């Protein structure tokens, strides 16, 4: 989606896939309340099968076609994706330049990894994936029913998870609409603050009620539900969809497939570790200690997003790469504060499909 979208809607389209994921999660929660696990597993087989079949007719992106030396097909593909008033030739020239760069750098070497334009996005991608998973999201999603049982809530655990699922969809749609308006950084920071507060309060709840038996209802059993709803909403507007979007935005085309693959593998490794050892962590450092630990990681994620991450909202590929190529102390001006802001203001005068304003005669 990042490869085919224009700069002004790249965030919306890039995070849109997360909306589909949350809808799928909610459907599993709903069906899971009525079906046995084996029938639920069978039902989950069909969406994946349907997606595999539909991928046969999925068109290739213009940048991939250019990288594969299929220029005429790339021009046709771009024409289908853009409004008739868009300056396709200029965009095609820019994509061709990116494709040539990618061809020259084919087969990423260790020497190329040392370049700032590759190394910086790489460690930022790893950091984004680390903080996404060590927020504790998969512990909450996979053990949500058990967490609600142990909290002493009067609501059925299956009902609580459905509430979580609905909240996740609403928040993800809301976040997708805001990502191109407010920017990536502010949403990540807000997400981190929401994580820290909700998990911190949940840890305090378990600390105060550490002697509560799972089968005993508590008058304050609503607190875990509110905390987890706030947590899920916070995750859905920031650290849920945005890391996937920003990795594709930050990485140069020549290294995008490698960095994306490594970051995705690292993400699932972290997800496995959290899911596998969540119960053991609760036994080792108690339930409240486990949630305090997740809250501490979320607190660190706020500083990570605020200090280290660049803002990519509305920036073109070349502008983002210019940001990473600047060395501190080199005496060069920082693109994010000069040229990038100027170009963003120019794009605000563009038409709804990225075409230039015909009333602008500055050129």
Image (cartoon, grey):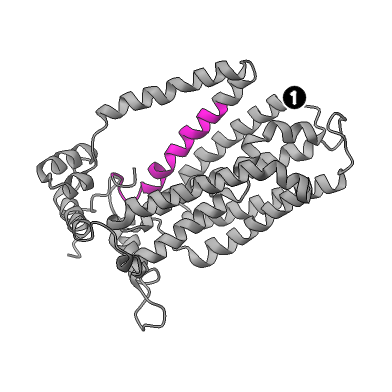
Q: Residue at x 57, y 18 (%)?
A: 38
In the picture, measured across the screen, residue 219 lies left or right of residue 92, that is right
- Residue 309 in percent (x, y) is at 47, 63
Residue with the mark numbered 1 = 156
Q: Residue at x 66, y 39 (%)?
A: 229
- Where 46 falls versus 299 (above or below)? above
Q: Residue at x 80, y 31 (%)?
A: 153
Whether residue 189 can be seen here: yes
Quarter of the figure with residue 298 = bottom right
Residue sitting nearer the eye, 122 or 250: 122
Q: Which stretch did the figure color magenta?
A: 4-26
Judge whether residue 282 is colored magenta: no
Magenta span: helix, strand or loop, mainly? helix
Residue sitting nearer the eye, 185 or 251: 251
From the image, which quarter does the N terminus lie in?
top left
- Where 20 falls versus 184 (above or below)? above
Judge whether residue 23 is colored magenta: yes
- Residue 358 in percent (x, y) is at 20, 53
Disc 1, SS: loop
- Residue 247 in percent (x, y) is at 41, 53
Residue sitting nearer the eye, 290 or 317: 290
In the picture, measured across the screen, residue 192 lies left or right of residue 23, that is right
From the image, which quarter does the C terminus lie in?
bottom left
Residue sitting nearer the eye, 8 or 113: 113
């Amino acid at each position: 989606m990042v490869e085919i979208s224009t700069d002004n809607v790249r965030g919306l389209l890039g995070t849109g896939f997360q909306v589909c994921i949350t809808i799928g999660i909610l459907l599993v929660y709903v069906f899971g309340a009525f079906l046995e696990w084996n029938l639920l597993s069978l039902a989950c087989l069909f969406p994946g099968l349907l997606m595999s079949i539909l991928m046969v007719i999925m068109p290739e992106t213009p940048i991939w076609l250019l990288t594969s030396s299929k220029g005429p097909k790339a021009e046709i593909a771009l024409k289908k994706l853009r409004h008739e008033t868009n300056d396709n030739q200029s965009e095609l020239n820019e994509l061709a330049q990116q494709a040539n760069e990618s061809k020259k750098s084919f087969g990423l070497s260790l020497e190329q990894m040392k370049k700032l334009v590759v190394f910086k996005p790489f460690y930022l991608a790893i950091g984004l994936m680390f903080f996404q998973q060590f927020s504790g999201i998969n512990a909450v999603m996979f053990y949500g029913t058990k967490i609600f049982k142990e909290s002493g809530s009067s609501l059925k655990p299956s009902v609580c998870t459905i509430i979580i699922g609905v909240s996740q969809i609403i928040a993800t749609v809301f976040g997708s609409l805001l990502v191109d308006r407010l920017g990536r950084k502010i949403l990540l920071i807000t997400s981190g603050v929401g994580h820290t507060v909700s998990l911190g309060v949940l840890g305090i709840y378990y600390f105060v009620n550490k002697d509560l038996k799972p089968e005993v209802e508590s008058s304050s059993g609503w607190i875990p539900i509110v905390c987890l709803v706030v947590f899920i909403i916070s995750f859905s507007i920031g650290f849920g969809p945005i890391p996937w979007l920003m990795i594709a935005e930050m990485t140069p085309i020549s290294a995008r497939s490698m960095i994306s693959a490594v970051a995705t593998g690292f993400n699932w490794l972290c997800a496995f570790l959290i899911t596998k050892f969540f119960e053991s962590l609760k036994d080792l450092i108690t339930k409240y200690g486990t949630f305090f630990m997740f809250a501490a990681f979320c607190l660190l994620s706020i500083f990570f997003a605020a200090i280290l991450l660049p803002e990519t909202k509305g920036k073109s590929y070349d502008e983002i790469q210019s940001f990473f190529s600047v060395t501190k102390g080199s005496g060069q001006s920082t693109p994010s504060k000069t040229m990038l802001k100027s170009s963003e203001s120019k794009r605000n005068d563009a038409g709804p499909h990225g075409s230039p304003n015909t009333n602008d005669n500055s050129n």
